Amino acid sequence: MKINKPIFWDKKKPNFLTYILSPLTIILKINNIILKLIPKKKFNQIKTICVGNIYLGGTGKTPTSLKLHQLLKAENYNAVIGKKYYPNQKDEIILLKNKSDLISSKNREEIIRFATEKNHELIIFDDGLQDRKIDYDIKFVCFDSKIWIGNGYLIPAGPLRENINSLKKYDGVFLKTTDENSNLINTISEIKKINSKIEIFNSRVEIKDINKFNLSNEYLIFSGIGNSKSFKEILIDNKFNVIEEKIFSDHYEYKDQDIQKILKISKKKNLKALTTEKDYVKIPNNLRSEIDFIEINIKIDQEEKLIKFIKSKINETN
């Protein structure tokens, strides 16, 4: 589903558009009720972890999935990342393929079958909490601690795929932040009121190899991701001099003329063109040389606690 996220979704207080659209949320409510009634399947031959969200886009699922893959491989798990194939999300597939062991298919059950045939013992699914058929062994939800749940309404009145009370059925939460001043304490308190037993892990976004950038330069930045605001914020937090910004829809497929226009503006204003790694993989090869990108790392607080938690949940299902 491709949706251009409206600005009012992220406002803490609902506005008139929220109230106008709120009757339409009944469609998603009915769908979620039906999902609860459909029996889900456990896969005993392989362990499954899902890193998903209930907030639509920009919560850090993909970099968090990559981080989990890295941590579990270091613990000698024969782990693989699973990603359902969507034609409009080729950027994430390319990124995951470049950085991990990846199995992708249009069907998640088929991904499990492929992984089992290849003797993997664990799959980390990037997205899929709302899958109709699979009962994952461990279910993580990702949030951006600044945006949290936006206005708190379901799609299309707000950004939520499920009601926030759905946290009762999940095992863990990753709270993404880029600085020390986000709403972590309040958000953690709200989560614990809903599910006192859920484990919460704070994660921070860091720019890899930041020293390769000349911070005296002035930048034109552009992105087509779920939360373009967070891209700009991490650059500003790291002292990048952002002069101009171009925002495209999530998973936007760049055309030659899009990039040529960006380069024309950057040259005219003597700015350096900069984008995300996820956007960079979609830029035509012949136009990449004049554009730079940032590569991010996710740093999870209390990594040892996270590994211990995952191991204990895996042992519970044995």
Image (tube, rainbow, N blue to C red):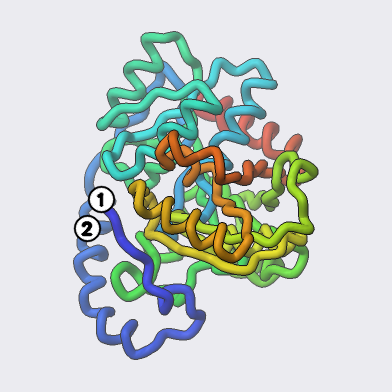
Q: Label 1's element?
A: helix
Would residue 279 be found to the left or right of residue 186 on screen?
left
Location of residue 116 with respect to 155 vertically, above or below: above
- Residue 176, by quadrant, is bottom right
Q: Residue furthest bottom?
A: 16
* Mark 2 residue type: Asn
Q: Which class describes the residues within 10 Å of circle 1: few (<14), some (14-19), or many (20+)? A: some
Residue 227, position in %: x, y?
50, 60
Q: Is residue 243 left or right of residue 130?
A: right
Quarter-of-image position of residue 114: top left
- Would you name the residue on which mark 2 appears? 31
Q: Residues within 10 Å of mark 2 (few under 14, many from 20)?
A: few
Tell me the CA gap for discs 2 and 1: 6 Å
- Picture coordinates of residue 31, whole percent (x, y): 22, 58
Q: Is residue 307 left or right of residue 114?
A: right
Residue beneath disc 1: 35
Mark number, residue 92: none
The spot of residue 125 in percent (x, y) is 44, 34
Of 79 and 31, the residue lying toward us: 79
Asked whether the residues under the numbered discs 2 and 1 touch, taking CB atoms below 8 Å apart as contact, a structural biologist would say yes
Which residue is at a point 55% across and 38% down the rendered structure image? 289
Q: Is residue 142 left or right of residue 163?
A: right
Residue 127 vs 202, above or below: the answer is above
The kind of residue tagged 1 is Leu
Residue at the image position 69 percent from the left and 61 percent from the top: 218
Q: Is residue 195 visible?
A: no
- Residue at point 67%, 41% (across, down): 297
Q: Quick check: can you spot residue 132?
A: yes
Q: Residue at x 41, y 79 (%)?
A: 8
